[in-house]
Amino acid sequence: ENRSDFSLNTTDCTPVVVPEEVFFTVAAAGILENLLVLIAVVRNKNLHLPMYFFICSLAISDMLGSLYKTLENIFIILCKMGYLTRRGDFEKKLDDAMDSMFILSLLGSIFSLLVIAADRYITIFYALRYHNIMTLRRALVILAIIWTFCAGSSIAIALFSYEAATVIPFTILFPLMMFFILCLYVHMFLLARSHAKKIASLPTSTVHQRTNMKGAITLTIFLGVFLCCWAPFVLHILLARFCPHNPYCACYMSIFHVNGTLIMCNAIIDPMIFAFRSPELRSTFKKMFCCVR
């Protein structure tokens, strides 16, 4: 609470506060929508495919992001009401747990998008061998490895976030993974047309190619939404770590609540993309809501 005159005068930007009602409504909607996606995939046996399992992984990451921001907001409210202190041992452990959940959500989203991109790549360029390459068992093993790595990394980063050796790799990972996915996209779209011409003589090749490209376009939408929703918050973390007293950095950090709300908006938008781009999911949702066999 004791702030120097220098810290008070670093910026004239007024913090932008999101109303708590809006905050919790957006978070609840994101959790509910992604939960519906998980239930739909579990109930419909036609969706028991590697692609939809990877989509479930992304849905779980979105749920964790909304849950993290919800718990953090509750923690702040309890601190303001005097039920919790900001510097107690219990509060510090709780804060570390929430930070770990945030990092797990971010890493889970990045690696889920990466594995979905790889799955689309295999579908387009190795269509005839896809079911031999990407089996259901292999997909589950990949997801188990991803989430084990993400869980271990999130705990390590949350516990040692004050160490430069921990912050720097985490800072580099986000743009590096995004760059790798973008390179995969560029290669995918540049070769898709020539690949389509080579297999044009095969039966139903046109239908398969159109479906595969639709999946690639869907993944592109996922990536664009992810960048728009997560990049502002990641930038906030970097500025808070490396230039907390700079006036321009402090001015940007005044919209902390807006950046946090964007993360939860990502959890709302992704299931809408699922439903809009996947006829099978749309049909499953209709059966769930209308109770039609």
Image (cartoon, rainbow, N blue to C red):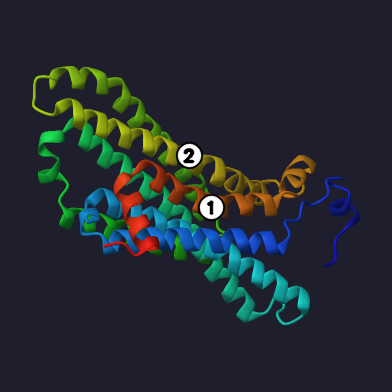
Residue found 72% across the figure and 56% down from its top: 18
Residue at 39% x, 63% y is: 151
Question: Which residue bears the numbered disc 2?
Answer: 175
Instruction: Name the disc covering residue 101, or none.
Output: none
Percent coordinates x, y for residue 145 in the rendering: 28, 58
Q: Nearer the viewer, residue 67 or 12?
A: 67
Report whether 34 appears left or right of 291.
Answer: right
Task: Tell how many labels.
Answer: 2
Instruction: Work out whether mark 1 precedes mark 2 in sequence or the reverse, and give the earlier one.
Output: 1
The quadrant the C terminus occupies is bottom left
Amino acid type of disc 2?
Pro
Compared to 97, does 136 lie above or below?
above
Residue toward you, 172 or 80: 80
Q: The N terminus lies in which quarter of the figure?
A: bottom right
Note whether 181 is above or below 163 in the view shown.
Answer: above
Q: Tell me if residue 86 can be seen.
A: no
Which residue is found at the position 77% from the left and 44% from the top? 251
Residue found farthest to the right: 5
137 w.r.t. 2: above or below: above
**Kind of element beneath mark 2:** helix
Tell me the SS state at disc 1. Answer: helix
Tell me the residue that label 1 is attached to.
Answer: 167
Residue 187 in percent (x, y) is at: 31, 25
Report crowding for label 1: few under 14, some 14 to 19, many 20 or more residues within 10 A (C-alpha): some
Amino acid type for the residue under numbered disc 1:
Val
Determine if residue 48 is in view: yes
